[in-house]
Each structure stands twice: as C-alpha cells, then as structure tokens.
Image (tube, rainbow, N blue to C red):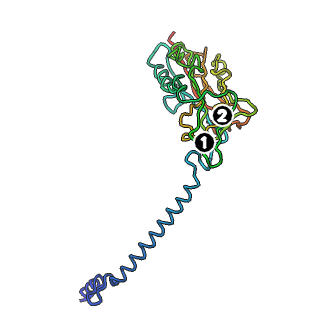
Amino acid sequence: MAKDGEKSEWKEFLWNPRTREFLGRTASSWGLIILFYIIFYLFLGGLFALTMYIMLQTLDDHKPTWQDRLSTPGLVIRPRQDETFEIVYTIQNTESWDMYAQALDKFLSPYNDTIQAQKNHACTPDQYFLQEDSGDVKNNPKRSCQFNRTILRECSGLNDRYYGYQDGKPCIIIKLNRVIGLMPGKDGQAPSVTCGAKRDDSDKIGEMIYFPSNGTFDLMYYPYYGKKAQVNYSQPLVAVKFLNITVNQDVNIECKIHSNNIPTGSERDKFAGRVSFKLRINSQN
C-alpha cells in the first residue's frame, strides 16, 4: 500500500489534473519563468555583443594595439629541412645536397629582380623608409623596398644554381625575424650579421664572405608596418658563403646580429639575436 501511495504522489507531482499543475507549477507560472530566462539571456548576449563591439572599435586592422615581444628579435637560416638546424651532405652525392639547392631556389624566387621591380619601390639606401599616417587617415597600403636577388651575388643562385654545395663551398641565407615598428640601428649605422665557430671548432670554419658586403641589413627596409599594411614586404637577407670549411667533421656555427640599439641576447634564450646550426660537409676523396 505504501508503494502505491508513493507512486500516486509522483504521478500527482508530474501532472495534477485538479490544479492543472505540471511539476508543481501552472502553465502561467512556467510561462513567466521561461519569459524571464529568455529576457535574461538576451540581455547577457546583448551585453557581450556590445562589449565586443566597443573593444573591436579600439583595434587597428593593420597594427596590433599591444605588442608583447622580445627586445631582441631572432635570426633564421635557410635552407632548413627540419627543426634540427643541421646541414649535412656529401659532395660527391648529388642527392644529398640537391634538396638544399632546391629549397634555396624556392625561397629566393620572390626576390627575382623582375618581380621586385613590379611590386616594390626603389628606395634610398642607408635611411629609414618612413610612411607615417596622417592622424586618423591611414596611409595604407604602404610601399615596400626592393630587395633584389642579385644583391646576394655568388649566393643568388643565378650564376651558380647549386649555391656552391657541389664544390664544398655552400651558401647559407640569414634573415632577421619581422617585428612591427622595429627600427634597428641608429645614427645611420645599419645592423649586421657575423658568423663564427663555436667552442673548439674555430680552426675548422675557414674563410667566409658575406653578401651584401659586411653582412648588413640596410636601414631602408625598416620599419616594418605589418603583413596587412605592407602586403609586398620583402625581408632583407644576408648570405654567408663558406669557402674552405674542414670536411668530414662537424662544425658548430653561431651567427649573431649586431646593432647599436638592439640588446645582446641572453644566454638563456639561444634564439634571441642569434642562430646556431651544425654544418658537416663529407668528401669521399
């Protein structure tokens, strides 16, 4: 009998035909609750949308409002086949170094002189290419300076399509990471790159030559205004050609950026203002 009573109470709670209540509430009570929550959530949604709209009005499509970045930008090398930062090949084995030559060809193709002449501006060297906005009037899109592939001379791949790899005199391309608004160098002194052997490899690295001369990044390529503002921006490059590196041995190399207004990278961050890689050229002779 007790079980029958409990079952009857549950049925009456679900639907009471005498009071016409569903789950203890009448239809009008449920209607008011549903209406309240509809209005409540519409208000929350509207408040969120208004907040997002106001926030978006403070943002610039072409330049980040806030930049949280390292004070010292990093360097990157090409060619690079993986994340190991190693270039290893055998002179007599074409397949071992042809991939590096192809990677450099692909990387440098946008720097062909004809493409640069079509897209970019012939700027005045040794000075910043400033393109400021006029108040609320945005000077967009901004022009970019030409960086012609021929500047890299022996490392351009135009006269030697194998970039010296077939002779054991490989070329490495170095670029400085893009940072919006960065103006490296001051008082007309352009930033430059130097490379050297690490630790006990100083007697193995041999001679090097840089293109452009002195391994400089000309000031006319700065400041960088961002991908949307400078659609055709061509990052300046420095090429290093190793002329007589010791064969059949690992040579650990570090390249650094030098500028009178860029802090020296910390030893704790091996990518700040520098890049390290291993170069090994094997020879069967």
Q: Amino acid at mark 1?
A: Asn
Of the residues under marks 1 and 2, which one precedes in the sequence?
Answer: 2
Residue 129: mark: 2
Question: Which of the pair 163/225 is nearer the observer?
Answer: 225
Question: Which of the pair 119/37 is nearer the observer?
Answer: 119
Question: Which of the pair 245/217 is nearer the observer?
Answer: 217
Residue shown at 64% from the left, 28% from the top: 123
The x and y percentages for residue 15 are 28, 83
Residue shown at 61% from the left, 37% from the top: 224
Residue 261: mark: none
Residue shown at 49% from the left, 23% from the top: 105
The x and y percentages for residue 82 are 49, 31
**Regarding mark 1 in the picture, which secondary structure is present there?**
loop
Question: Which of the pair 272/125 is nearer the observer?
Answer: 125
Query: Is residue 224 depicted above or below 98 in this figure?
Result: below
The x and y percentages for residue 32 are 39, 80
Q: Amino acid at mark 2?
A: Phe
Residue 139: mark: 1
Say left or right for 23 vs 150: left
> Which quarter of the figure has residue 253?
top right
Query: Is residue 43 depicted above or below 71 in this figure?
Result: below
**Regarding mark 2 in the picture, which secondary structure is present there?**
loop
Query: Is residue 24 depicted above or below 246 in this figure?
Result: below
Residue shown at 49% from the left, 28% from the top: 81
* Number of residue marks: 2
- Where is the N terminus found, in terms of image quarters? bottom left
Mark 2, other Cα within 10 Å: few <14 / some 14–19 / many ≥20: some
> Which quarter of the figure has residue 249?
top right
Mark 1, other Cα within 10 Å: few <14 / some 14–19 / many ≥20: few
Given this view, does label 1 or label 2 mark the residue nearer the observer? Answer: 1
From mark 1 to mark 2, how far is it between C-alphas?
A: 13 Å
